[in-house]
Amino acid sequence: MKMPYKLLVMGASSSRTSINRTLAIWAAEQIDAQMETVDLNDFEMPIYSEDRQAESGIPQLARDFKEKINACDGIVISFAEHNGSYTAAFKNIIDWVSVVEKDLWSNKPMLLMATSPGARGGRTLLESAVTDFPRRGGHVCAHFLLPSFYKNFKEGVHEHSLKKAFDLAALAFERGMGGSPI
């Protein structure tokens, strides 16, 4: 009997009440896997700059984050969109981790998602991440967008067409990890 997959799960936000963290954890719970949830607040580092890197080196927290990526079988991320882009906390982490190893995501299978209170649900950022992450060593198996979080999520995605879209994304992600582990 194979061991369950190990997922690295995060809401790409530093908000302690992040709806994206809620969505990411719920999504990972729908997949037969063990999960490790990452709180970006645990990886707060100085703002990346080449000068700071030259003066102080790479922070241990960046190395620790990269170790978590290398130790998992798949990654689930739900993005909070700030002005059409990644949150500053998330962007700073990936800036630092990318100097630890250029292949940031270690070719790990990824399920990328986004949600927001609004009707677009973080669409601009999700589209950007789906294009950007393969260039950073991510194997994007699937993506899912949940618009109007407070309308469409109550202990899970409940609107029928959105739930169906999520189920298809989760299946594609699981297949990207090699199918059912058990």
Image: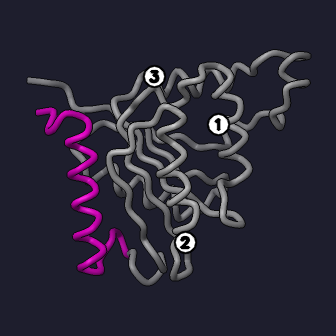
Distance between the Cα atoms at labels 1 and 2?
Answer: 22 Å
Q: Check disc 2 and report its element: helix, strand or loop.
A: loop
Q: Residue 77: horizontal and vertical position, in percent?
A: 47, 49
The image quadrant of residue 153 is: bottom left
Rendered-image quadrant of the N terminus = top left
Distance between the Cα atoms at labels 3 and 2?
Answer: 29 Å
Residue 3 sits above or below residue 117 on the image: above
Q: Is residue 99 magenta?
A: no
- How packed mark 3 is, by other alpha carbons closer than 10 Å (few <14, some 14-19, many 20 or more), is some
Dot 1 or dot 3: first in sequence order is 3
Q: Check disc 3 and report its element: helix, strand or loop.
A: helix
Q: Is residue 171 magenta?
A: yes
Magenta span covers which residues?
A: 154-182
Along the line of sight, the residue nearer the viewer: 98 or 18: 98
- How packed mark 1 is, by other alpha carbons closer than 10 Å (few <14, some 14-19, many 20 or more), is some
Q: Which residue is mark 3?
A: 70
Residue 77 sits above or below residue 62 on the image: below
Looking at the image, the residue that sits furthest to the left is 1
Q: Which residue is mark 2?
A: 116
Distance between the Cα atoms at labels 1 and 3?
Answer: 14 Å
* Residue type, label 3: Asn
